[in-house]
Image (spheres, rainbow, N blue to C red):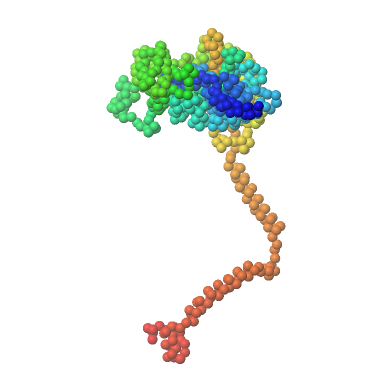
């Protein structure tokens, strides 16, 4: 019986190793839309799913194994990670892409739903393991998100996935506004994709182009999605949204600094009175400027990802341009094209490159291209500033503007560092329409020095076509000497405020999110040269005092005759006397010798005389 089992073991192992998990769908999309001011919006989206049964059994195909094992180890059921830099111009570009749901504050922002567990400290241990693991995976400083930079919002975020039991899940939120997003974060991001950025739409993601953008955000969202109680999948969506300056992006790499254009090549506005041969006022550009994928991103799309099987993949390019806009598609493969009044959709060929070019063109319909945007009017405008002066106190001032003809409910979230201590009794609201504005709900968690920051959540209704101003005062804490960074005079970063616009059933079906810009808070900074002066002075005094006392306690005073000579001193004295004798003997021998003239005089006189020269004789 045992022999039969041993003989069947290799066959069972072979069947287990070569058994392939169920196929999972994979989707890639690219959204292109020209923006006013010579800018181009490019939105990349990569979506992969895996059945939860395969995920629990460690079967990974399109879902990245490195990220999946981290989520399993830390018992994380839903994850949202953001890398962002720059500022989205709401007034010129319109509403934020994807409703702001895939956007984060400046730096790094993360929030996740983690299982609480039975032990009281288990949740914090799992959260610490999650941020430390993601820190190593994405080459970021997420390990600096400790208890002082972690908050637990109550109503600002809602889970996007389908969770059977939310009672055992806790929401944790952390930010790093001073984190610099660079190529070191993009490379691990691309490694999570099936083709690692070598093929498909991801082949356009070049670090030189992305991080030269006016606004850029990378996001990773993992959530469970269930169509039925027994049919659940785990979905990961990776998105990259950027706004590029077309002229700067198409500049050749061998000419990074633009050279001045000769005056004869500049189109001048001849209607100006001061127009002359040596005076030129550049004429405003009219129409649509030229751009192409290969010029903006440095290369065309390198086909689709060959790792995805037929029937489980989707590659689509969405281009939002007017219907009369001329578009040239350059490829050797077969593609499909769909047109309507405002957008065009293209498929990516199997193993052929694809380039989209839009030549310069003047459209008769759009006489003012700088005044239009493919995105709608934002549902809300938000800005925030620090007011006041001095090193002790200051104030926070937030402005919320509602351009819509109906009132909107919002949730305003601020996660303040512990060294910024707000005074909640100074919290005031003021509406431009004169209406009385009061918070419907308020969740406030005070800070604990060096352990927990301040968390403030407010639910406010902003009237139609009005502006609501929120303000309060705060006090600045004094840090310890070792808590100041090397660039303390630059200021301390305050995370961006998160504004959630609750969906109105008549106008929108999903909530929208927007972030304000991060702030710089100047704190009382000591003179860092004084500690070094104190260290030098005290070290000198201690050295002099300790040296004198040590000599008095250890040294023994005696006469020179009482000290017996040491053997080494005796030998040294003998050598010294010998050298002295040789030095004194050499000149004496030279002086005692007689010259030929002296001997001759001595023979004449019969005695030794003084030195006489031959000339005198």
Please give the name of the residue rendered at 34% of the width and 24% of the height, measured from the top-left corner: 282
Residue 81 in view in this figure: no
In the rendered view, tell whether residue 436 sits above or below residue 134: above
The picture places residue 543, in percent across and down from the top left corner, at 64, 52
Quadrant into which the C terminus falls = bottom left
The residue nearer to you, when weighing 391 against 344, is 344
Residue 123 in view in this figure: yes
The picture places residue 433, in percent across and down from the top left corner, at 55, 12
The residue nearer to you, when weighing 273 against 320, is 320
Position of residue 483 in the picture relative to residue 507 (left or right): right
The residue nearer to you, when weighing 285 against 356, is 356
Occupied quadrant, residue 120: top right
The residue nearer to you, when weighing 164 against 99, is 164
Occupied quadrant, residue 391: top right
Please give the name of the residue rendered at 61% of the width and 25% of the height, measured from the top-left corner: 72
Please give the name of the residue rendered at 48% of the width and 80% of the height, measured from the top-left corner: 591
Quadrant into which the N terminus falls = top right
The picture places residue 418, in percent across and down from the top left corner, at 63, 29
Position of residue 296 in the picture relative to residue 579 (left or right): left
Direction left: furthest residue: 277
Direction top: furthest residue: 506
Please give the name of the residue rendered at 35% of the width and 17% of the height, measured from the top-left corner: 326
In the rendered view, tell whether residue 580 sits above or below residue 278: below
């Amino acid at each position: 019986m045992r022999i039969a089992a041993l003989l069947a073991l290799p066959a069972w192992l072979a069947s287990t190793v070569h058994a392939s998990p169920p196929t999972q769908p994979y989707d890639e999309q690219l959204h292109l839309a020209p923006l006013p001011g010579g800018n181009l919006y490019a939105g990349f989206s990569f979506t992969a799913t895996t059945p939860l049964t395969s995920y629990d059994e460690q079967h990974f195909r399109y879902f990245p194994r490195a990220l999946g094992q981290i989520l399993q180890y830390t018992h994380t059921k839903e994850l949202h990670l953001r890398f962002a830099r720059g500022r989205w111009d709401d007034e010129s570009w319109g509403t934020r892409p994807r409703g702001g749901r895939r956007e984060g504050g400046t730096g790094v922002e993360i929030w996740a739903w983690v299982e609480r567990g039975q032990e009281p400290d288990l949740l914090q241990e799992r959260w610490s393991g999650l941020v430390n693991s993601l820190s190593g995976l994405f080459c970021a400083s997420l390990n600096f998100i400790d208890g002082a930079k972690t908050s637990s919002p109550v109503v600002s975020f809602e889970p996007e996935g389908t969770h059977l039991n939310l009672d055992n899940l806790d929401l944790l939120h952390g930010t790093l506004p001073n984190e610099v997003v660079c190529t070191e974060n993009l490379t691990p991001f691309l490694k999570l994709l099936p083709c690692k950025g070598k093929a498909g739409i991801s082949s356009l993601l070049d670090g030189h182009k992305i991080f030269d953008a006016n606004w850029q955000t990378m996001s990773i969202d993992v959530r469970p999605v269930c169509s039925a109680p027994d049919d659940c999948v785990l979905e990961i969506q990776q998105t990259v949204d950027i706004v590029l300056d077309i002229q700067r992006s198409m500049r050749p790499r061998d000419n990074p600094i633009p050279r001045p254009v000769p005056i004869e090549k500049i189109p001048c506005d001849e209607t100006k009175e001061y127009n002359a041969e040596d005076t030129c006022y550049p004429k405003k550009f009219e129409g649509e400027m030229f751009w192409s994928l290969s010029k903006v991103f440095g290369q065309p799309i390198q086909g689709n990802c060959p790792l995805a099987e037929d029937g489980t993949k989707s590659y689509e390019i969405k281009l939002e341009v007017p219907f009369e806009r001329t578009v040239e598609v350059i490829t050797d493969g077969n593609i499909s094209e769909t047109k309507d009044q405002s957008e065009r959709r293209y498929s990516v060929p199997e193993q052929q490159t694809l380039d989209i070019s839009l030549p310069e063109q003047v459209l008769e319909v759009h006489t003012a291209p700088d005044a239009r945007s493919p995105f709608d009017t934002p549902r809300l405008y938000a800005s925030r500033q620090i007011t006041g002066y001095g090193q002790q106190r200051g104030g926070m001032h937030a402005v919320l503007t509602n351009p819509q003809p109906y009132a909107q409910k919002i949730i305003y979230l601020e996660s303040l560092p512990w060294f910024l201590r707000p005074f909640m009794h100074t919290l005031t609201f003021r509406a431009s329409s004169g209406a009385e504005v009061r918070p419907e709900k308020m969740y406030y968690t005070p800070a604990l020095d060096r352990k927990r920051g301040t968390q403030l959540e407010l639910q406010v209704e902003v009237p139609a076509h009005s502006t609501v101003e929120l303000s309060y005062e705060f006090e600045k804490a004094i840090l310890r000497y070792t808590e100041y960074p090397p660039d303390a005079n630059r200021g301390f970063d305050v995370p961006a405020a998160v504004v959630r616009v609750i969906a109105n059933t008549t106008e929108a079906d999903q909530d929208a999110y927007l972030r304000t810009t991060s702030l710089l808070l100047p704190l009382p900074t000591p003179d860092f040269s004084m500690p070094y002066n104190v260290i030098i002075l005290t070290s000198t005094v201690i050295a002099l005092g300790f040296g004198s006392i040590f000599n008095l306690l250890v040294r023994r005073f005696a006469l020179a005759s009482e000290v017996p000579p040491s053997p080494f001193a005796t030998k040294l004295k003998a050598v010294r006397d010998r050298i002295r004798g040789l030095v004194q003997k050499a000149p004496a021998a030279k002086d005692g010798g007689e010259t030929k003239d002296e001997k001759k005089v001595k023979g004449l006189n019969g005695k030794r005389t003084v030195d006489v020269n031959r000339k005198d004789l």
